[in-house]
Amino acid sequence: MNTKIALITGASRGLGKNTALQLAASGVDIILTYHSRTDEAATVVAQIEALGRKAVALQLDAGQCAQFSDFASRVEAALEQHWQRSQFNFLINNAGIGIHTGFIKTTEAQFDQLMNLHVKGVFFLTQQLLPLLADQGRIINVSTGLTRFALPGFAAYATMKGAVEVLSRYLAKELGERGIRVNVIAPGAIETDFGGGAVRDNEQLNQFIANQTALGRVGLPDDIGGAITALLHDQSGWINAQRIEVSGGMFV
Ligand code: NAD
């Protein structure tokens, strides 16, 4: 009954999926959210179960605040059905989209889409789930290396992630009295579907970033899932209110 549970948004693929699998392999049960691909979510659940851990997949549009109260009720019901409420220890706000049109071409609709998912979504989803999260629990918000290094195209996206980094510091301050740690993982460029698979599929971009990275390559999902798993380890409990860049030394 001491098993901890992690809720990971956007975990049917990419970094969220990898994090779910690495956490499960380390003994954590998983509530994963998926946006629309029920089939992908079912595959991740089966992979987690094959590791001997429990997993539940819940549909969520993490950019629709109006859904969050109902979603929190579904999380509560899942906890009561499969575990105990006190076991919900880790919240990982990972869901995200990459829009890289550049400052001049960014439309208000694109800005709002990014804002709703990356800022309002993280703010109000966390607010709704906090009553369920155990004292001494942990929150990880996924940001980006691009809040420090300006890569042409990503002005609006990086602006949103910058807001999440500020929010994370405030959350750490306000939730410290419950023993909840809040940190940011800021990935470098990682080979996933993100941004239309740009880092993975655009050889020129991939090589450019590899050349600008101390370790000489772009990142893989394992690099981020591993870092998040390490940050949620009992022995990392004194790390709080930090932005941890996981990029192999990108643009150092
Ligand atoms: P990905 O496209 O492979 O996965 C994104 C996930 O978010 C998917 O599961 C998708 O279904 C989900 N998602 C998208 N919109 C959603 C919505 N409205 N509601 C709920 N879920 C939604 O991308 P990824 O690389 O795995 O990205 C994960 C996180 O990492 C994002 O927050 C992204 O900004 C961040 N990040 C990625 C990179 C990279 O190079 N891949 C770099 C820095 C930061």
Image (spheres, helix red, strand yellow):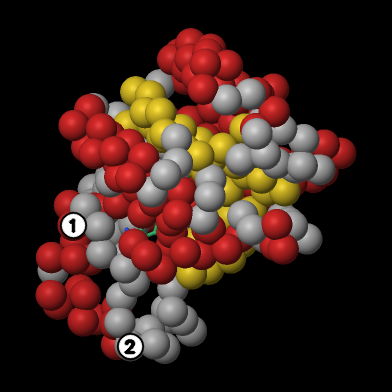
Q: Say which element carries label 1.
A: helix
Residue ranking furthest to the right: 177
Taking depth in this image into account, of 157 and 88 the one nearest to the observer is: 88
Q: Which residue is mark 1?
A: 197
Left or right, residue 242 beside residue 120: right
Q: Residues within 10 Å of mark 1 (few under 14, many from 20)?
A: few
Which of pointers 2 and 1 lies earlier in the amino acid sequence?
1
Q: Which residue is mark 2?
A: 216
Q: Residues within 10 Å of mark 2 (few under 14, many from 20)?
A: some
Q: Amino acid at mark 1?
A: Gly
Give the x, y percent position of residue 110. Answer: 29, 37
Residue 72 in the image: above or below residue 2: above
Q: What residue is shown at x 14% (from left), y 77% (from top)?
A: 204
Give the x, y percent position of residue 160. Answer: 47, 46
Left or right, residue 104 beside residue 29: left
Give the x, y percent position of residue 232. Answer: 61, 55
Residue 91 in the image: above or below residue 205: above
Which numbered tag is attached to residue 95?
none
In the rendered image, is residue 98 in sight? Answer: no
- The image quadrant that residue 208 belongs to is bottom left
- The image quadrant that residue 1 belongs to is top right
Left or right, residue 250 beside residue 98: right
Residue 178 in the image: above or below residue 247: above
- Per the model, the C-alpha gap separating discs 2 and 1 is 20 Å
Taking depth in this image into account, of 151 and 43 the one nearest to the observer is: 43
Q: Amino acid at mark 2?
A: Gly
Q: What residue is shown at x 57% (from left), y 63% (from top)?
A: 230
- The image quadrant that residue 239 belongs to is bottom right
Q: What residue is shown at x 34% (from left), y 71% (from top)?
A: 219
Taking depth in this image into account, of 216 and 144 the one nearest to the observer is: 216
In the rendered image, is residue 201 in sight? Answer: yes
